[in-house]
């Protein structure tokens, strides 16, 4: 991972009546795509809101592009897409563009905005409420990109979209990241999207950051082991994260897949997907 | 700041322009045919109402969570509502005054009603300023719908207290009523409406500061 950090969360804590986030320590390396995963209510949106200056943390420090998210000049260099927070749906894309031009001033590139609308096939004069969900997401992305941000912070940008639209949006992210100074932090439940584009994965579980690891390392590190209980007992302490029993035997999420295969040469241990990792961690804590 | 003003103005225009035109036509017709000029005073109230509605639209679209990621301050986000409210109330005041004058011109009653209408519009403007000075901070604190109910209850209590006070106080016993008695009716009306607008503007400025403080603390 590159050394330079685009964003840093340092000991971030946030307490709500029925939920506590943190303390979270997370560094988003510049020039990468970081996927933030976790179950519903794990704290992903809370984390993104703190990072983008929507809400302050109770304790800890959030740093965005070398400054504070509370600083408007810093926020001008970031493009944000939230799943359900945007302009009123009675506005048209053209009016949203004019409003954003007034908000961002000289940073706003009206030609780039028109270009994105054109690329996404969006009619600028249609009201947002006349758009489909996919079109709304594309419009949100167009507004997030038209002021040439250095970083994109995206909350569930591909949720509820069909595979074709998701593919287009993921391509857009890969285009954006071609510039080495550009960074994306995106939360998503669709882990297959993150497997396609993310450089690293951060996993939030019940408000706690369980890990933030390079995606390829993660996929190599974790494995799904299928074996009998006797074999399982031969593994060193801490290597098995969680085991699920079924009629066909037991399935275990293991950490250190290569070592497991060395210790149990006859066992089947496939690489685990991000979904598998989440399911097994969730199952472990549910017990 | 201009972008925020544009956003709210366009939200109002795209949502309420038909409603606004209907209200203008209906109220003018009532003022003209039923001799109810106070219906046009209500136009000033409508001007403020549209701004209060933008807070509901913001709530519906979760605008504030998004707005806080933009390069604008809390003071600006709240300030545009107040600026636009002043603009709409001022514009509605001018329009109401114009329509009242036009009605009287057609009826041939311009001379006798001119000052009364002007004073009536000024009183309406003052009262509306005070009403929204109370409503807007409550809207930021409690949400637009609950704030409206809260202010209506508060107004009801205030009117009740004033009525009770006037019932228990001997007429002409205060220095204010003595001073009012010394002036003629028109002068009193302008003195009262001018004072009301001055109080309204001061409260409006304080209201903006209170709303900004509430908004800064609020989480989305």
Image (cartoon, grey):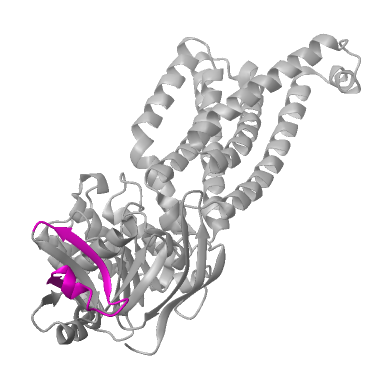
In this view, which residue lies farthest toward the bottom? A3
Who's the residue at 34% across and 60% down the image?
Answer: A285
Position in image of residue B93 (x %, y %): 56, 33
Relative to A184, B57 lies left or right:
right
Vertical order, B170 against A85 (above or below): above
Quarter assignment of residue A262: bottom left
Who's the residue at 43% across and 47% down the image?
Answer: B8
Quarter assignment of residue B191: top right
Along the line of sight, the residue nearer the viewer: B105 or A46: A46
Q: Is residue B122 magenta?
A: no
Position in image of residue A66 (x %, y %): 48, 81
Along the line of sight, the residue nearer the viewer: B25 or A224: A224
Along the line of sight, the residue nearer the viewer: A213 or B17: A213
Position in image of residue A168 (x %, y %): 14, 67
Vertical order, A41 against B175 (above or below): below
Position in image of residue A45 (x %, y %): 38, 59
Relative to A87, A174 lies left or right:
left
Vertical order, A220 against A120 (above or below): below
Relative to B134, B28 lies left or right:
left
Along the line of sight, the residue nearer the viewer: B100 or B208: B208
- How many marks overall? 0
Q: Is residue A187 visible?
A: yes
> Which quarter of the rendering shows the N terminus of chain A?
bottom left
Q: Is residue A192 visible?
A: no
In this view, which residue lies farthest toward the front? A230
Magenta range: A224-247
Who's the residue at 34% across and 41% down the image?
Answer: B14
Q: Is residue A245 magenta?
A: yes
Who's the residue at 69% across and 46% down the image?
Answer: B206
């Amino acid at each position: 991972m590159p050394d330079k950090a685009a964003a840093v969360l340092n000991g971030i804590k946030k307490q709500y009546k029925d939920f506590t986030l943190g303390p979270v320590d997370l560094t988003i390396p510049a020039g990468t795509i970081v996927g933030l995963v976790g179950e519903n209510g794990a704290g992903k949106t809370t984390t993104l809101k703190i990072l983008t200056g929507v809400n302050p943390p109770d304790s800890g420090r959030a740093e965005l592009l070398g400054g504070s998210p509370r600083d408007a000049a810093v926020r001008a260099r970031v493009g944000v897409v939230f799943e359900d927070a945007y302009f009123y749906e009675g506005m048209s894309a053209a009016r949203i563009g004019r409003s954003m031009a007034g908000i961002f001033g000289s940073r706003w590139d009206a030609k780039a905005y028109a270009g994105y609308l054109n690329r996404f096939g969006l009619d600028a004069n249609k009201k947002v409420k006349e758009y489909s969900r996919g079109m709304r997401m594309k419009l949100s992305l167009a507004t997030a990109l038209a002021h040439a941000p250095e970083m994109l912070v995206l909350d569930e940008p591909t949720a509820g979209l069909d595979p074709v639209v998701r593919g287009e949006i993921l391509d857009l992210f890969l285009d954006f990241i071609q510039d080495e100074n550009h960074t994306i932090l995106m939360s998503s439940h669709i882990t297959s999207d993150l497997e396609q584009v993310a450089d690293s994965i951060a996993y939030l579980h019940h408000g706690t950051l369980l890990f933030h690891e390079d995606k390829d390392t993660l996929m190599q590190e974790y494995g799904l082991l299928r074996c009998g209980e006797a074999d399982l007992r031969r593994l060193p302490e801490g290597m098995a994260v969680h085991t699920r029993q079924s009629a066909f035997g037991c399935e275990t999420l293991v950490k250190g897949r290569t070592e497991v295969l060395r210790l149990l040469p006859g066992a089947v241990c496939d690489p685990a997907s991000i979904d598998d990792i989440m399911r097994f961690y969730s199952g472990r804590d549910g017990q | 700041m201009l972008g925020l003003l544009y956003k709210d103005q366009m939200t109002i225009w795209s949502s309420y322009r038909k409603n606004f035109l209907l209200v203008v036509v209906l109220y003018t017709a009532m003022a003209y045919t039923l001799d109810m000029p106070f219906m046009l005073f209500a136009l000033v109230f409508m001007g403020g109402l549209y701004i209060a509605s933008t807070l509901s639209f913001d709530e519906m679209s979760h605008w504030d969570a998004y707005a806080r990621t933009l390069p604008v301050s809390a003071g600006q986000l709240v300030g545009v509502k107040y600026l636009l409210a002043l603009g709409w109330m001022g514009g509605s005041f001018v329009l109401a005054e114009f329509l009242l004058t036009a009605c009287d011109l057609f009826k041939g009653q311009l001379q006798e009603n001119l000052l009364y209408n002007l004073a009536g519009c000024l009183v309406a403007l003052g009262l509306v300023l005070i009403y929204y000075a109370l409503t807007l901070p409550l809207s930021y604190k409690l949400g637009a719908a609950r704030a409206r109910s809260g202010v209506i209850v508060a107004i009801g209590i205030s009117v009740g207290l004033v009525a009770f006070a006037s019932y228990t106080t001997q007429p002409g016993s205060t220095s204010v009523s003595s001073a009012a008695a010394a002036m003629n009716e028109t002068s009193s009306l302008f003195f009262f409406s001018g004072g009301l607008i001055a109080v309204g503007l001061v409260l409006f400025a304080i209201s903006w500061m209170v709303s900004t403080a509430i908004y800064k603390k609020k989480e989305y």
